[in-house]
Amino acid sequence: MLDTYPIRETGMPPEMQTLLARYPRDSWEAHPGFRGKTRHWLGAHRMFRRVAERIRLDTEAVLNKDMDLDDYAGRLSYCGGNLVGNLHGHHRWEDRSYFPELAAADPQFAAGLDVLEQDHADLDRVLDDFTRQANRVIKLAVLDESQARDEAGAVHGTSRVIEAFLNRHLTDEEDLAVPIILHHRLRG
């Protein structure tokens, strides 16, 4: 399932990590340019990671018959809608506002930001498949429990893809963007 979608398996090239070497992750919190807006942005990333993990764990529980199908369908609807809707909004804001601001502040990193924008387009395809699969499971939960559990297997595979995708993408995004923010004292 993981090889069905174009997930970058390598991190950003070394030339996109020059500021990260000057501003390593463990120094961000103490930097005077690390402020509320950046904390909020990173908090959104933590939330995406947690919700994606929750969906996968819930799906594993229903597949193992450790969770009632009706409970699962309700949680899948809530968590899935939260993840998909918020990721689409977050990425739209990054592509239209945040990344252009970062590219203007430090044009040498524009190529890395282009890679991240392509990730957004690639992730959209995964999220569309996930949405179709999840909606099918939710509908089947009231119609045919056996078939719903079978379909949950597809949701599980796609949820694993989403987790892997987010892990690679969000780490690269943070490692590229936060050092630019700190270096140029952006996002007050």
Image (cartoon, rainbow, N blue to C red):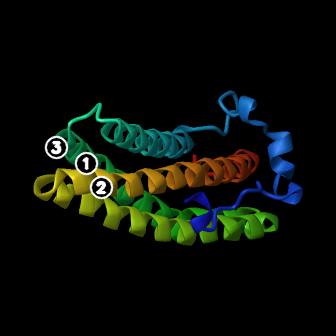
Q: Which residue is mark 2?
A: 81
The image shows residue 42 at horizontal and vertical percentages of: 54, 42
Residues at circles 3 and 1 in contact by the CB criterion of under 8 Å? no
The image shows residue 184 at horizontal and vertical percentages of: 73, 51
Q: Earlier in the sequence, mark 2 or mark 3?
A: 3
Residue drawn 32% across the image and 57% down it? 151
Q: Which residue is mark 1?
A: 78
Residues at circles 2 and 3 in contact by the CB criterion of under 8 Å? no
Q: Which residue is mark 3?
A: 70
Residue drawn 64% across the image and 64% down it? 116
Instruction: Assess disc 2: are there few (<14), some (14-19) or many (≥20) residues with their C-alpha within 10 Å of its C-alpha.
Output: some
Q: Earlier in the sequence, mark 3 or mark 1?
A: 3
The image shows residue 179 at horizontal and vertical percentages of: 73, 47
Report, in whole angstroms, how far the alpha carbon at label 2 lies from the one at label 1. 5 Å
Residue drawn 12% across the image and 58% down it? 143
Describe residue 138's horizontal placement relative to residue 48 as left or right: left
Report, in whole angstroms, how far the alpha carbon at label 2 lies from the one at label 3. 16 Å
Instruction: Assess disc 1: are there few (<14), some (14-19) or many (≥20) residues with their C-alpha within 10 Å of its C-alpha.
Output: few
Element under disc 2 = helix
Residues at circles 2 and 1 in contact by the CB criterion of under 8 Å? yes
The image shows residue 62 at horizontal and vertical percentages of: 30, 40
